[in-house]
Amino acid sequence: MAGRCAGKLALVTGAAQGLGRAHATRLAEEGARVLCTDINAEAAASTASIIIREGGDALSRKCDVSNTRSMEALANYVEKELGAPDILINNAGIGLSGSLLDTSVKDWQQVLGVNLWGVIHGCRLFARQMIDQGRAGHIVNVASAAAFMPSRMLPAYATSKSAVLMFSECLRA
């Protein structure tokens, strides 16, 4: 597959399904070698298999984006085995519905861990690799329209996506 991403390495978090799978397959269609990551190793491997079956180049790796050590292990693997990514799609995310009083501390920690800390970890670790290896790169952080629309039934999710939006704007500045 040749395209505008030919010869590029793209890393997609949350590549097991939905938007993550769509990002991964589209990048492969454009010629990128895609590293599909997800907390669900089998589903990430399934996305990589789809890409390979369609003639693309992909591999997969299990990673919990909310866990600092897991992300650091992924970054070490990428740096040693693949080289710095040219494209990073911080896509991993989880939704949670429920009012403030129905949302436990554990729920808040999980949503903020995946939706916000996953993005922070990805940017911090892979931007450093791009810079250290002298690569121009692209980082895409996936937020949501919920970042702009307050909802009494989505306080954790909307807060996490608003934080991703602001974090991304801070990086752009």
Image (cartoon, rainbow, N blue to C red):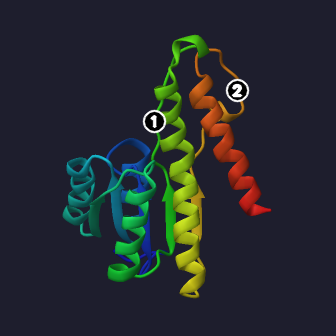
Residue 94's disc is 1
Identify whether 125 is placed above or below 44: below
Identify whether 93 is placed above or below 82: above
- The residue indicated by pointer 2 is 149
**Image position of 21 (left or right of 54):** right
- Residue drawn at point x = 27 percent, y = 67 percent: 59
Q: Quadrant of the C terminus?
A: bottom right
Inspect the image, locate mark 2, and give the three-letter code of the amino acid beneath it.
Answer: Met
Identify whether 72 is placed above or below 81: above
Residue 30 in sight here? no
**Image-quadrant location for residue 31:** bottom left
- Residue drawn at point x = 58 percent, y = 11 percent: 101
Inspect the image, locate mark 1, and give the three-letter code of the amino acid beneath it.
Answer: Ile
- Residue drawn at point x = 33 percent, y = 74 percent: 1
Q: Earlier in the sequence, mark 1 or mark 2?
A: 1
**Image position of 123 (left or right of 80):** right
User: Please, which residue is most extreme toward the right here?
Assistant: 173
